[in-house]
Image (cartoon, rainbow, N blue to C red):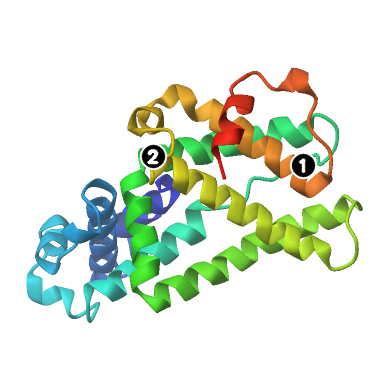
Amino acid sequence: MGDRYLALLEQQIENGSGRSARTRAKLLRAAFEILANDGISALTIAAVTKGAGIAVGTFYLHYPTTTDLMLEVFGGFAEHDIKPALPTSRKGSGLFTEMKAEFLEIVAAFRRRRIFFRAMFAFRRQEERANDMWLRHSARWAAELSAAAMSASRTPDGFPEFVGHAATAFADEIMARIYIDNLFGAAFAENEANDERVAELLAFSRQRLLYGVDPDPSLMTIQGIAGLSPAIT
């Protein structure tokens, strides 16, 4: 998460069609790096233009304010780097093992980029346009999860849509509580060794929500799920 969007910006900087497109990509990359390393309070026009290597006045040729710049950064990040964890086989052991693999990538990225996500959550609270944008993306992800729940044929008519939104909200809330609010402490959030524990918790919960069955216990390599779950309310 974050790597695909950054790679796209780098490509635009190197091969963008026209000077304006390349300059815009430089501004977006600089903004992303500031948000990822220093947080939302550090995002100023002076800091962005310095990071992009362009004149301050050039900023206003592309964005009226840093708020508009941040909207594009968050929109690009959500579009290219966030996706729901879903199995491709959707049957047997693949339900759990494939979702766990997806969640491992998501959890590791969330841990590494928790300063950026903290900025994203704060921006959603401050800016209505940012929250509206996030809700649109969330609805799309929820629709994919709803389709998976419907394919499982385990829920009554109309219920899969609710399940899709619940599955999305659950993962968002758990990762925010762990990596932004430090639910289990800062040391836990910073420790890469805990990625698998969190990924298994999320994959276990998603399989239960979408498919109505628990995974085979033999697939669960981490025994810490039982210890994690009661602390999450």
- In the figure, residue 89 lies in which quadrant? top right
- In the figure, residue 42 lies in which quadrant? bottom left
For residue 99, say whether it is visible: no
What secondary structure is marked by label 2?
A: loop
Disc 2 crowd, CA 10 A, few/some/many (<14, 14-19, 20+): some
Depicted 147 relative to depicted 7: above or below? below
- Going 49% across and 52% down the picture, which residue do you hit? 81
Badge number at residue 182:
2
- Going 52% across and 51% down the picture, which residue do you hit? 173
Relative to residue 71, is residue 34 drawn left or right?
A: left
Give the residue at mark 1.
Answer: 208
Depicted 220 relative to depicted 163: above or below? above
Depicted 151 relative to depicted 139: above or below? above
**Nearer to me, 164 or 223:** 223
- Going 12% across and 60% down the picture, which residue do you hit? 47
**Nearer to me, 231 or 124:** 231
Q: Nearer the viewer, mark 2 or mark 1?
A: 2
Relative to residue 224, is residue 90 drawn left or right?
A: right
